[in-house]
Amino acid sequence: MDERTASPLDLDDDAAEPETSQLLFEEKSVCLPKPHFFNSDYHAPYVRYVTTFALLLASDIGAGSSAHVETSISGKVLSSKTNLEISVFTSIGRLWEHEAYALAILIVCTSIRWPYVKLAMTLYAWITPFDIGCRRHLELNPRVLLAESEKTLFWLDILGKFAFVDSFVLIVLMVVFRATVTILFTTTDVWVSPRWGMYGFIVASILSLLGTQIALHLHRGGVCRELDKDGDKPTLNSWEGKKCLIAQSGCHAAFVLLALASSAALVVVGSTVDTFKFIYSGVTSYETTHSVISIGPNILETARDNGVMIRLLRAFYFILTMGVPLISCCIYGVLFFVKATPHSARGMFVLAETALAWSALDVYMLSTVFAVVQIPNFARHLVDECCKPCFTIEAKIDPLFTVTCAGALMSFFVGLMLVTKAQKTLFAVESVGLCCNSKHKDAVSLRSALV
């Protein structure tokens, strides 16, 4: 028997024969997992990406928010007008013009540049590993392809939520710029309301997140299907029957329980304490304090709207800042401490990975820091345009905001640690078969671990 076709290629041996690697490229029937972006059974996934890109661009160009001023005497409206209407793109110029440089740079990086870069990188990570990347890496180390591709998609999925920074900044703006000033019998109302551009951007960002998660799912599914065809299946370190992942992963049970309990407690406390306050002075002087949980109910009142879209915006805010971080702790607990079969554990892992990607308390934290520091500079000019005698604004971050930051950071890093550990345990691959044509169908057998 030909020694080259009978012996498996041991990945632990760095001195593998170059002839075996070269053989993979000489044969046209190499059975690597297909580039399932174009060859999956799902309905035209590239259409979803093109649609998301177009919706992002249209939302960035279209009006995202508008500032309104209404004057009334004894309840009778004298005038009501829109003094300012901005999009995501034009807001950058406004912020820069009004010396809110840090906030302008943050929005450029997270809400303008990042969504498009993320879409492009998702396509690159999904397609090239089995095409361009194949020739570049496979002859050196075949497992590099699968590991690098999945790792790239994983981080794109986890960091995709930071595209919502602009949305959270606008929500803070809506709460801050709601004011009613009464002078004798004359009342002046000032408020900021979201427009279709903001809703479109949120929908596009959600589609982008879903697209990355689908890409990651199809990547793993495509690899496993190819393994099944060749009789080489992912193993779970001799995991048979129902077992707890905590025992299989090697994590200390007490440490995981303490981390989850601490994370949940900090999220709850951090959501209820005051995070920042705004001090208004002018015709009337007062101050308002806000927490994560108090901003949500104010969204309807500040926008002077009770429609379906504004209610969905409030739900979106609560789900991402409070709902998902708390639910994710429960999901991590079930994943690690409830006995399950490998198939059930992998299903729960998908939920845990999704929860980590959608938990946005850290996005709120980042948005709040920049918004509170920079809004007074922007507000000074905006108020001059809309209502000169109304008020001036000062902003301060409350010392208790550190609790919110601790909850956000702990929620993220505990989730990242547990999801990474679960992935390495649940998707440890015994071997990846690269089957060639009948002449070389037993050319190589690769031992791999999907990171």
Image: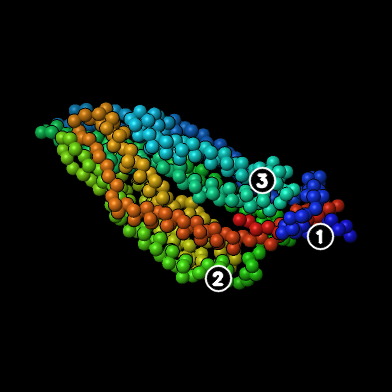
Marks 3 and 2 sit apart, C-alpha to C-alpha, by 34 Å
Instruction: Give me the residue at 88% from left, 57% from top.
Output: 2
Quadrant of image for the C terminus: bottom right
User: In this view of the protein, which residue sits in the foreground, 255 or 214?
Assistant: 255
Please tell me how crowded label 3 is: few (under 14), some (14-19), or many (20+) other residues with Cα within 10 Å.
many
Query: Residue 129, labelled with which disc?
Result: 3
**Mark 1–mark 2 distance (CA, rounded to whole Å):** 35 Å
Residue position for label 2: 247
| Residue at mark 1 | 7
Residue 144 relative to residue 347: left or right: right
How many C-alpha atoms fall within 10 Å of the one at disc 2: few (<14), some, or many (≥20)?
A: few
Position of residue 104 relative to residue 212, above or below, is above
In percent of width and height, residue 79 lies at 22, 27
Query: Which residue shows up at 55% across the image and 61% down it?
Result: 421
Observer-nearest of 39 and 256: 256
Say which element carries label 2.
helix
Q: Nearer the viewer, mark 3 or mark 1?
A: 1
Label 1 is placed on what type of residue?
Answer: Ser
Amino acid tagged 3: Pro
**Quadrant of the rendered image containing residue 396:** top left
**Secondary element at image label 1:** loop
